[in-house]
Structures are given as structure tokens and as C-alpha cells.
Image (spheres, helix red, strand yellow):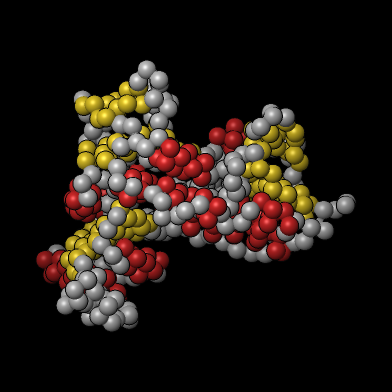
Amino acid sequence: MAGRERLLVIGGDAAGMSAASQARRRRGAGELDITVVERGHFASYSACGIPYYVGGAIGDADDLIARTPAEFRERGIDLRMRAEATEIDLDAARVRVRAVEGGGETWEPYDRLVIATGAVPARPDLPGADAAGVHGVQVLDDGIGIRRVLEQEKPRRVVVVGGGYIGLEMAEAMVTRGLDVTIVDGAEQPMSTLDPDMGALVADAIRGLGIDLRLGDRVEGFDTGPDGRVTAVRAGGRSLPADLVVLGLGVRPGTDLARAAGIETGPTGGIVTDRRMRTRTERVWAAGDCVETRHLVSGLPVAIALGTHANKQGRVAGINLGGGYATFPGVVGTAVSKICHAEVARTGLNEREAAAAGFATLSVVVGSTTRAGYLPDATEMKTKLVVERRSGRLLGGQIVGEENAAKRIDGLAIALWNRMTVEEMTGLDLGYAPPFSPVWDPVLIAARKAAELVEEDMRRSP
């Protein structure tokens, strides 16, 4: 039909399908054709749930799928699976698409283009890194492959390379299955987004689970047997036996396709967009793990790969493409994770990041309990606040504890979003009942101690 616009979306997970769905809600099939190309086997699934599928808490991989390709097609979205975009021709407004199975190629024209190519996992360029038994964890296919190995080959010894969020969550999956687990990290602490004092608490919790935690050891290579399968990880001059290796070394924005086309990327490597998710290239939008955004505390560009951001950014792009108006203001860097009973959370800036952004800081670490201390199931938690000297503005927060500790980070994230001072935070009207909190919530205790520290600092340094 003449006059119909063509929207082409590259990437069929959180950001891409959110953009396509929002655009379709606002513009019907009679005025907007929507095509999505996705190179994988699955679309619109929870990548964050993969460690829990691997660990067995989720019985079926289908439980992680929010909507099937058939459901999207019923809504008038032409979702093409196993179709990989290999080139963007900006001058001709078209994208070269290759069938992953079969290799046939076509050129798909567009009036508007959304790039939602996600993130690319880091894989070390080391001997044996491509050996059988060495697995990355990025897409649902990876999780299915690891679980198949666990159930069919019955490995006993697992080495997890990387002590960040995905590394710890995969270690939890292996501990849950009763395997011997070693975590190797080249940093001096796990969870390098935490300050060292809080990272040390995480290290203690990991070792308390019986995990062999090797910190400050750089991986040097992977040994293999006669059959080509991994048998050990070489790190820090040692050989660590392994029947299975899981890589959790983080990700970078997946921007190779965009950069090859001349679409601008920023200092983080992510695609540069405005608040409406438009790139600086006419008719091209971008969303999700492939873009960079603004940190609302530091004011600096950041690339943070989280499904929460991807869904929001895709929604914003889709609303605007559908004729509405929406913006994505930025992030404060909130994240939570757990490894068995240990919960970890952070938001805003840690001390190192705050100093790099030019802030003079003070910090406090406060111990408390998750419930009223007289209840038998109350557990300990530590809360750290990083605040700006003199003004007392909250700059960041970190929490390490057990059950019901980590989600308290949300209160700190809201305070950051609203640029609150710790003195203002002491009056927050938070919920209280003994099963949920002490009468002074841990967030309020930390805010009160931080406010006292700011006042004391002001007296010492008028």
C-alpha cells in the first residue's frame, strides 16, 4: 500500500521488541510495516534468568520467554528468526540480511531503522579459549548448552572466570547443583563495582559457601585433553582442574555493525543517542545494551548492560516512532545480585568513581539487621553511603547482607534520582514492622550516621 512507512528493527530481544511493540500500539498495520530481524533462536526472553535456569530453579527454558515469535506476528510484526543483519547502507536506506541457516541474502529497505544489537561478551584471546567445555553466557542458547552439559556429562569441577555479576550468579548455579566451584578473578576483590571494604565482605561470603576464590590471578590459558576438551585453567602460575569452564568477564556494546556504517559511537563504545533514543544519523534510532547513556550523578557517559534499561529505552524509541513523545533521562547505576544466601547491591558512584568525577567525598559503613533484632530470623547487613563533602548530597550506596537486604538499594536509588542530601533522607517515611525492618531502617541509620559525619566535617573545616 502506497504511503505506508517501513520500520526495520535489528535485534529481537528486550530493546528491539519493546520498540516494535510500542510503535505497533500507536500505528496500525495500514500505516506502518514493522520488520524485526533476529539472528538467534529466541526473541523477547529474560537473559537475566539464564543462571537460574542453569541452576535448575527454572525447569524449562520456555519459561524465560515473554512472548513467542507467533504472538508478535499475530500483532502485525514481521519477526524473522535466524536472520542476521550484516551491513547497513545508510545512503540507500537498506540493510543486508543473511539467513543464518542456508546463507541466502536479501536487502531490506527502511524508512526508519532501530539498532538493538545488544552487547558482546568478552572472551579472552588465550590458548585453549575456544576449546570444548569453555562456555560463555550471553544468550539463551548458551544457557541451554551449559545445562545440557551438566545433565548429560555430569562434570564435577567447575571454574568460573570472572567475579562480577554474571560470574557470581553462575557460581551460585553450580553450587546449587552440588559441584566443586572455583572462581578466578584478576582483580583484588570480587564485584569490582563495589569499594574494597564492601568487596571484602562479598569475598568472605563466597568463601563461606565452600567456593575456592582466587583473587589477583590472571588467567593464562586453558589446558585440553586428547579429545580437545578443557581439563584445567592456568591462572596465577597454578593449574586449576576443570571439567567445565564458565566465562563471566563482562560485555561491551555490540556496535560493530553500526560503526562500520559510520554511525557515531561515544567514549564508552556505545552508540550515541539523544534522550528520545535518536542517533546522530538521520532516520536511525538505537536502544539497549548497544547504546551509551548519561549517568545522572556523575554526568558522564556510561554503558551499562541491564534488561531494565533496555526495555525502557526500547519503549521510548517505540513511542517516538509511533508518533508520541517520550524520553530516557539516564541512569544512576543500580544493580543487585546474589550468590546463595549472600545479597549484594549498589547504586550511584563508589568512592573511586566519585573521585574520578571530581567530587570530594565522605563515607560511612553501618551495620544493622534486616528485621527487628529480637526476631530469630533477623540477619546482618552492611550499608555504605558515599556523600559529597559539605553539601551532604548522596552520591552512592552499597549493601552486602543476607535475605531481604539487597532490595533496600531501591530507596537509595530514589534518593539519588532526586538529588537528596543525607540530612533530608533521615526524615524519609519508610515502612516499619518487626518482620520487615528494625524501628530504624538500615537506610535511615546509614543516612543519620552520614549526616552526623558531614556536620562534624563542617565543624572541623569551616
**In the displayed structure, does residue 424 sit left or right of residue 61?**
left
Q: Which residue is drawn at 30% across and 27% down?
A: 232
Q: Which residue is drawn at 16% across and 77% down?
A: 374
Mark yes or no: residue 342 visible. Answer: yes
In percent of width and height, residue 282 lies at 67, 46
Q: Which residue is drawn at 77% across and 61% down?
A: 28
In percent of width and height, residue 61 lies at 52, 50
Q: In this view, does 374 lie above or below 124?
A: below
Camera-nearest residue between 333 and 358: 333
Camera-nearest residue between 374 and 158: 158
**In the displayed structure, does residue 280 sit left or right of residue 57?**
right
Q: In which quarter of the image is the C terminus?
A: bottom left
Figure quadrant of residue 101? top right
In percent of width and height, residue 98 lies at 68, 33
Mark yes or no: residue 268 visible. Answer: no
Q: Residue furthest top?
A: 226
In percent of width and height, residue 47 lies at 49, 50
Figure quadrant of residue 371? bottom left
Q: Which residue lies furthest to the right in this view?
A: 2
Figure quadrant of residue 84? top right
